[in-house]
Amino acid sequence: MSSPALSRSAGDGRAAAPVRLVHLGLGNFFRAHQAWYTEHAPDAPEWGIAAFSGRRAELADALNAQDGLYTLVTRAGDGDRFAVVGSVSRAHPAAQHDAWLGYLGSPDVRVVTITVTEAGYVRGADGGLDRDRPEVRADVDALGADFGARVRTTPARLLAGLAARRRADAGPLALVPCDNLPDNGGVAARVVRDLAELVDPGLTAWLDENVTTVTTMVDRITPETTPDDLRTVAEGTGRTDRAPVATEPFSEWVLSGAFPGGRPRWEDAGATFTDDVGPFEERKLWLLNGGHSLLAYAGSARGHATVAEAVGDEPCRAWLEQWWAEASAYLSLPERDVAAYRAALLERFANPRMRHRLDQIAADGSQKLPVRILPVLRRDRSAGRLPEGAIRVLAAWIAHLRGAGAPVKDAHADAVVPLAAGPLRDAVRRTVDVLDPAVAADDELVAAVRGEAERLEYQGREP
């Protein structure tokens, strides 16, 4: 006999709250993080979320069949804890563009949160909108003809929604990007403004007066859902859940910026509001995310499948500590706080019950390494040092592009994979040039990366 499905009518969660938040990028991290904080805010009954997927409809359909409810499985060392999250009042596939425009044109909606990964902001080398990308050009043409037209990119979806809000005179709105990018609020504001200047320069003045962008730092390790997770939830709760999320006990959210239309009381759920996200952002990007990138490439080249497996391997653990030592030297937070964060990270990484897959983390290295690794690398080179930890990450990424370890999944794979092919003496400089031409012009550094890449490739071929 099958277990009953989650349902609000069956009393599995509170009644759906009125939609006052909209989220773009429906996925596991959003549901373990922003939706979780909203669920635990004391005014949660006033702040329902309408969440939109990036492309695929399956998750939205599964959630709607369960009245937006899902089970959050918190994987602690002493066992699993189960909780039903009810802050998603409605889920939508990306194809429901009219619904997106309708929500953003409503004065009831006050905040838009975003999780679309680093690649979703379609930025060029200068950090602004990549105006030469075919999908960007197509969106410019579509919006130029009709702001209600279907579009493909995140900046265009945001701009279309904001134009709908201007037409409806629906009042001010806060954009809250929650992706792993330095100054993600500034990034979101810039790409939207760049697109507005291409489509309707007159819209920029309205954006300046009515739209704020909030910079955030987000932290909670959240792997992809597996069939085992579905079975675990059914056995542990007696309910069938087609869309559970497994995550770790640790969670952090730091925000800086104005919410002119109000927001949930996220601070009462554990979020931190500050005037400067930068120090927290660097700590997380360099230590957690940079450490993840190291393990994803070097660890998978050594045959490991998960973070826990890799960090349990003595060479990988030593490489991680070496990278952390290099990065920690440039963090502005107190040394005691950094040491405590590193100790907590080791415990989080070593949690064998999380099953955080290295091939998932390895995706989009061409977008991730410039913000996770290069800031530390540049500082050490300016001081005349060759940072072995940073060099190893670059070398492991290049070996990954050449077939070592996890399969390549990158928004720029068509460009970077051919560059990494062929003799390493040429491939290393070509590939690093994609990340930063100035770094690629450093002969001593390129030679060090090449040597480490040769060692990693040889290691990957060992029986």
Image (cartoon, rainbow, N blue to C red):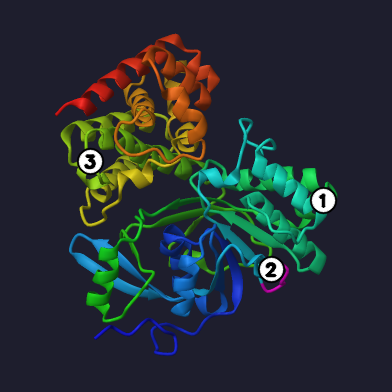
Front residue of 207 and 245 = 245
Classify 381 as above or below 359: above
Q: Residue at x 37, y 44 (%)?
A: 361
Left or right of residue 285: residue 198: right
Where is residue 446 drawn, in percent x and y?
41, 15
Spatial CA distance of label 2 from label 3 is 45 Å
Tell me the mark number nearer the camera, choosing from 2 and 1: 2
Amino acid type of the residue tagged 2 in the rendering: Asp
**How far from the left and from the top, in percent, is residue 322?**
28, 29
Residue 155 highlighted magenta (yes or no): no
| Sequence-first tag of 3 and 1 | 1
Q: Which residues are magenta?
A: 104-108
Q: Is most of the magenta stretch helix, strand or loop?
A: loop
What amino acid is at disc 3? Answer: His
Q: Which residue is mark 2?
A: 98
Task: Mark yes or no: residue 268 visible.
Answer: no
- Residue 169 in the figure: left or right of residue 124: right
Q: Which mark is residue 304?
A: 3
Counting residues from the start of the chain, the first of labels 2 and 3 encountered is 2
Label 3 and label 1: CA atoms lie apart by 52 Å
Name the secondary structure under disc 3.
Answer: loop
Nearest the viewer among 30 and 428 is 428
Q: Circle 1 is placed at which residue position?
A: 205
Image quadrant assignment for residue 131 = top right
Vertical side of 460 occupied by 152: above or below: below
